[in-house]
Amino acid sequence: MASHQSRRGAQEPHAGENTQGVDSYPYDPTLRLESLNGLDRLRCFADRALAADFFAVFQAVERNTAMAEARERERTQRREAKLQSLRTLAARAFEGELGSEPKELATHLLLDEHGTRASDERSLHEFALAMGQLRRLSR
């Protein structure tokens, strides 16, 4: 009798678990797992507790993926904002707004032999580092 209860308890959804979500995908013995995609695959599991566990895993994966994508978007936005800031700094230096030494530094670091301004991320970061050193030396 005790083994019957523990077996039955293992098949029932866990306390507090969202079974309403898995109930949206009722078991259908006529379906083939390989013919379905996403959460519709839950319809292939007769063991509804297992289907509920899979549903919880799918929800966690979706949530984690959405969070990772949001973090990546934020990182990209910060990177673009930083790059724009560096472009502005370089433009101000080229115009002489920051003084003659920053203008000379920008000319040496950001102009190629044809007089074309470099605007790639690496060159702009190197320029920013050199500007920081120049400012420290000027104090």
Image: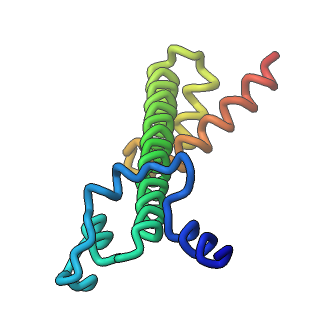
Quadrant into which the C terminus falls: top right
The residue nearer to you, when weighing 109 against 23, is: 23
Image height of 43 relative to 31, above or below: above
- Count of marks overlaid on the render: 0
Locate residue 8, reporting x and y percent. 54, 71
The residue nearer to you, when weighing 122 against 115, is: 122
Residue drawn at 40 percent across, 53 percent down? 19
In the picture, measured across the screen, residue 8 lies left or right of residue 33, that is right
Residue drawn at 50 percent across, 18 percent down? 96
Locate residue 88, reporting x and y percent. 45, 25
The residue nearer to you, when weighing 2 against 114, is: 2
Residue drawn at 65 percent across, 78 percent down? 3
Locate residue 131, reporting x and y percent. 66, 30
Quarter-of-image position of residue 32: bottom left
Quadrant into which the N terminus falls: bottom right
Locate residue 46, reporting x and y percent. 35, 76
Image color mode: rainbow
In the picture, measured across the screen, residue 132 lies left or right of residue 63, that is right
Residue drawn at 50 percent across, 35 percent down? 78
Image height of 5 relative to 92, above or below: below
- Residue extending farthest to the front is 1
The residue nearer to you, when weighing 82 against 36, is: 36
Image height of 14 relative to 88, above or below: below
